[in-house]
């Protein structure tokens, strides 16, 4: 930086001819600094209009770093590739929350605490039983998570650090149990209780799939694959559900309620519901021959998108998708090849050579191959968003913790640009028809 340069931005308002100097910090300006820019004393001041928060930073964070152009993802500075290869989901959960990799004694204690919380209150089971037998597991899951606030009322003491840690351990522990119980309810199977001899993902597979055997033995390849998938889904900075978590959390409600809202945001097909949508899309395409026609329809804007492609932040191959593609082949060694894989591989190849997708920098995202793996492992498609919500829990809670401890944060309350009717007088019901006829 030369001596004459300053970390400021000069804005000239051509409506008034006035100039303003605004500080630049961390490559951004404070939106509230724009409020000084007015056409007159009655003017509210300039606002930034940014639907979908395309270019608005709502927080300062030290948790997850993404460089979307380079395809880089790091948790607390550690590259996702190294964590996927060398770490475990519980260690990553610890890392996200505490900011550092744990010592052996620390991870052992954390794992012990999580294990001690895996059982859910018997009343929670009755709650799950109340859902219709064919209810979507994600609806049952996020409602049950919200209901946890009625079991653990102390969760509302959000400024007590010990209390927050207990709720963190509790939620990381209980999410798989609630998820599996919702699934078993939806297929009419008795609940399978947590098995403390198994790993986090091994136990989840046990609660999902245990049948008449006395002891469920997870396949180690599938158990490891699920652990890697959980690591890849653990956090992704300010996405839709995390922003929802922070938004709800900004009103200082308990974390169970906030997480339930975050899970609701995750449910949609543009976010965590995308891998379910990818599977449906692959089934609908049906064969490799039908791919060109499908791509033509997407490009013509015939109401469909190439699900599992594109990302708000990544304008390059999603680094998670690269790892997931490798995991897919490891899983298929055990389960047999998912017949939809060949359609997916061809679809990816054709799309990546097509100008429409190249020009818009649309690459496969985390959801493109994950559904194929989950399906091969025996998970029904309805469980896919639930399988996203379980590992996102430590990410949501770490972001929530960061937010409520950040003195710069306020209750979330965006502005709007009002374009509706000006003031008008109420018209009594009896006079409305004639009023409508007169104005028609
Ligand atoms: N298929 C076809 N066209 C697409 C797609 C797609 N999947 N994604 C974006 N486009 C086009 C879009 O039509 C637009 O074209 P144009 O400029 O001609 O109008 C352009 O690319 C920009 O799209 P956008 O909708 O403005 O981009 P966005 O950043 O608002 O949306 C997205 C991001 C992820 C919602 C979107 O890419 C999408 O709908 N993808 C499919 C759903 C999906 O796979 N979601 C999972 C995201 S990763 C996991 C997660 O975050 O949960």
Image (cartoon, helix red, strand yellow):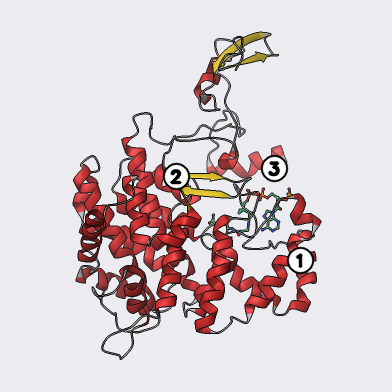
Mark 2 and mark 3: Cα distance apart in space: 66 Å
Instruction: Classify residue 434 as left or right of residue 249.
Output: right
Q: Locate the C terminus by quadrant.
A: top right
257 and 119: which one is in front?
119
Apparent side of residue 167 relative to residue 319 in the rendered image (left or right): left
| Pointer 3 or 1: first along the chain | 1
Spatial distance from mark 3 to mark 1, Cα to Cα? Answer: 57 Å
Q: Which residue is mark 3?
A: 437
Q: Residue at (72%, 80%) from the top-left corner? A: 287
What number of labels is visible?
Answer: 3
Q: Residues within 10 Å of mark 1 (few under 14, many from 20)?
A: some
Q: Nearer the viewer, residue 367 or 412?
A: 367
Q: Secondary structure at mark 1?
A: helix
| Numbered disc in front, either 2 or 3 | 2
The location of residue 228, given as percent across then percent down, is 45, 65
> Label 2: how many residues lie within 10 Å, few (<14), some (14-19) or many (20+)?
few
Residue 124 - label: none
The N terminus lies in which quarter of the figure?
A: top right
Q: Which residue is mark 2?
A: 77
For the question of whether residue 35 can be seen, the reply is yes
CB within 8 Å, label 3 to label 1? no
162 vs 304: above or below: above
Q: Which numbered disc, 1 or 2, marks the residue closer to the eye?
A: 2
The residue identified by callout 1 is 350
Q: Residue 332: which quarter of the image?
A: bottom right
Give x and y (percent) for residue 283: 64, 77
Taking depth in this image into account, of 216 and 166 the one nearest to the observer is 216
Q: Is residue 341 above or below residue 170?
A: below
């Amino acid at each position: 930086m030369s001596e004459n340069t300053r970390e400021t931005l000069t804005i000239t308002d051509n409506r008034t001819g006035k100039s303003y100097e605004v500080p630049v910090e961390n490559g951004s300006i404070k939106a509230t600094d724009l409020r000084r820019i007015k056409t007159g004393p009655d003017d509210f001041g300039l606002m930034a209009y940014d639907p979908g928060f395309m270019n608005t930073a709502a927080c300062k964070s030290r948790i997850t770093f993404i460089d979307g152009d380079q395809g880089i993802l790091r948790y607390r500075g550690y590259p996702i590739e190294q964590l996927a290869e060398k770490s475990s989901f519980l260690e990553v959960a610890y890392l996200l929350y505490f900011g550092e990799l744990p010592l052996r004694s620390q991870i052992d204690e954390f794992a012990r605490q999580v294990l001690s919380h895996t059982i859910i209150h018997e009343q929670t089971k009755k709650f799950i039983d109340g859902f219709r037998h064919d209810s979507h597991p994600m609806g049952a899951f996020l409602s049950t998570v919200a209901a946890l606030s009625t079991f653990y009322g102390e969760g509302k003491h959000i400024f007590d650090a010990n209390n927050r840690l207990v709720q963190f351990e509790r939620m990381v522990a209980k999410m798989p149990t609630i998820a599996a119980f919702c699934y078993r309810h939806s297929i009419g199977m008795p609940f399978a209780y947590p098995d403390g001899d198994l790993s986090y993902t091994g136990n989840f597979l046990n609660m999902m799939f245990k049948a008449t055997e006395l002891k469920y033995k997870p396949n180690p390849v599938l158990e490891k694959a699920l652990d890697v998938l959980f690591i890849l889904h653990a956090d992704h900075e300010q996405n839709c559900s995390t922003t929802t978590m922070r938004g709800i959390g900004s009103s200082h409600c308990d974390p169970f309620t906030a997480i339930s809202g975050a899970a609701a945001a995750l449910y949609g097909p543009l976010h965590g519901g995308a891998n379910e949508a990818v599977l449906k899309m692959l089934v609908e395409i049906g064969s490799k021959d039908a791919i060109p026609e499908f791509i033509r329809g997407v490009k013509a804007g015939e109401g469909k998108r190439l699900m599992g492609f594109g990302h708000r932040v990544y304008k390059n191959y999603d680094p998670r998708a690269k790892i997931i593609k490798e995991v897919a082949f490891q899983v298929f060694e055990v389960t047999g090849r998912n017949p939809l894989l060949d359609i997916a591989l061809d679809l990816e190849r054709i799309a990546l050579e097509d100008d429409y997708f190249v020009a818009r920098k649309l690459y496969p995202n985390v959801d493109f191959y994950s559904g194929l793996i989950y399906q091969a492992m025996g998970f029904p498609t309805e469980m896919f968003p639930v399988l996203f919500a379980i590992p996102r829990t430590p990410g949501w809670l770490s972001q929530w913790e960061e937010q409520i401890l950040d003195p710069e944060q306020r209750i979330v309350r965006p502005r709007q640009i009002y374009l509706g009717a000006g003031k008008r007088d109420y018209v009594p019901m009896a006079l409305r028809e004639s009023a409508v006829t007169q104005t028609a």
